[in-house]
Image (cartoon, coloured by chain):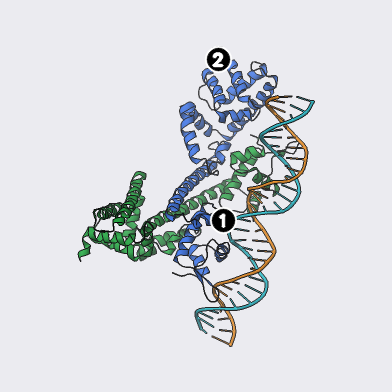
Chain colours: A blue, B green, C orange, D cyan
Amino acid sequence: MEYTVQQLAKTAGISSRTLRYYDEIGLLKPARLTSSGYRIYGPKEVDRLQQILFFRELGVGLEQIREIINDPSFDSLTALREHRVKLLEKKQQLELLINNVEKTIAQYEGRIIMTDQEKFEGFKQKLIDENEAKYGKEVREKYGDEAVDKSYRKMKEMTQEQYAEFEKLGQMVLDTLKEAMAAGDPASELAQKAADLHRQWLCFTWDNYSKEAHAGLAQMYVNDERFAAYYDRIKPGAAKFLRDAVLVYTGMNRQ
Amino acid sequence: MEYTVQQLAKTAGISSRTLRYYDEIGLLKPARLTSSGYRIYGPKEVDRLQQILFFRELGVGLEQIREIINDPSFDSLTALREHRVKLLEKKQQLELLINNVEKTIAQYEGRIIMTDQEKFEGFKQKLIDENEAKYGKEVREKYGDEAVDKSYRKMKEMTQEQYAEFEKLGQMVLDTLKEAMAAGDPASELAQKAADLHRQWLCFTWDNYSKEAHAGLAQMYVNDERFAAYYDRIKPGAAKFLRDAVLVYTGMNRQ
DNA sequence: GTAAACCTTTACGCAACGTTAAGGTCAATA
DNA sequence: TATTGACCTTAACGTTGCGTAAAGGTTTAC
């Protein structure tokens, strides 16, 4: 089959301008030119265009596409298999995004509550399997088991008002913690108030509070960098300070 | 929760430059500025950013996004429901594209033939329901000839392991073929092994194997330049060699 | 023979940031 | 207290992948 610019453009679902541009930058040159200078594309060009569009769909720059497919060691079949994998990943990400929008609808309808993290799930590209692995295994097996899962579910069941109260309390924990750190003593009155606020805050999502669990969680804040980052962004060492305060508060520091 | 540019950028998976740009064009202004002019974003801005990213994901221009969400009659919930529909459509299109790439792989491997139309399926955006109609009727009646469809469906039903096995077998065909060609005799033991492996490979996607069909396909490998290219890339003349080997294997060379 | 529907090159425009550059701010440390 | 390093700021130019005229030649259809 031979095609003129517009014919090929139509079958490929792109514009003729795009084809001329691809010619201009040396990405896809026509098979030949007619005597009057019209571009004519053949079967090879059709396949090459298809490859180009696969790469383009995956966000690869035109310049880079040219380098890739002009490379003598380039193998179409291998490339196609890679496309397939990437597209499947993209589909997974899209499913995350659909999940996100459905959750967000539920949130707007007041049925559930979302964390800020969740609100952007599916937008980010890379951390797909990392998240899967990390979130699914490590956290739940190492610390979370049941409890993390349960607390998450409970938070999702919160109403708007409850959540506002929850956030406010969370902010108070941080504020009090920061103020208490200025003094520097985890046993101080202010630090103990922070620990108490923290307990109240936890009780929003915890079914049954225990000193042991509270102290254990505080220790986890120090061990796990992701939790630590949450508190340390207020002030470096905040996670440790909170742990110490909680250890005093729960009386677990004497063991 | 309050965020600085970089913190919000990180949680949302975008760059801080993007946030500054969105501020510049009045798309997303920070909740407030610190005394030193630092941008601070609050919960409202987080939700607004989420909405923006949903629109952006669907290819809406920033200018238009601003108009939409600044409109007093804008309803987040309605917008979200529309997002959901659009995302589901996008997913459908992605599935078309994945379908396409899998078909293309099958084509490169010499199992099926594609029309130029099919090669660009999934790239175009709008023709979704048209595709639906076309797929069901025209295409299948015109070219599909049942078998192609069946073999393709069978491949899609393969598990990961089966597919890996299938691929491995395909590679073995090529390897054995290459080795056999060194000797040069299509009736040699090695060449016959290649033909047998080829039969096994075909049986992954064929419902009912017959000597006639096998020999016919082998002949097609030589006739159709696109199939020939797949085998000849191993070694020039490989398609012909395979055909001859298969003709011996099936006993169709004596007719 | 002429209109409609193609094709050509040239060139300016644009969206959505990326990328320096040049400098101010903030919290931890020596 | 000074300094270091990791933040933040504005300003401004650069880039990618085309869209969109403008000005004109070619082909096909009646």
Amino acid type, mark 2 = Met
Dots 2 and 1 on the same chain: yes
Residue A255: image location, x then y, percent: 53, 12
Question: As drawn, which residue projects farthest toward the top?
Answer: A254
Residue at 33% x, 46% y: name it: B165
Q: Is residue A120 placed above or below A27 in the rendered structure?
A: above
Residue at 56% x, 49% y: name it: B57
Subunit that carries the residue with mark 1: A
Q: Which mark is residue A63?
A: 1
The residue closer to the viewer here, B227 or A122, is B227
SS class, disc 2 = helix
- Given contact means CB atoms under 8 Å apart, are the residues at marks 2 and 1 in contact? no
Q: Which residue is labeled 2 in the image?
A: A252
**Mark 2 or 1, closer to the camera:** 1
Q: Which mark is residue B234?
A: none
Residue at 47% x, 30% y: name it: A140
Q: Is residue A174 placed above or below B5 in the rendered structure?
A: above
Image-quadrant location for residue A186: top right
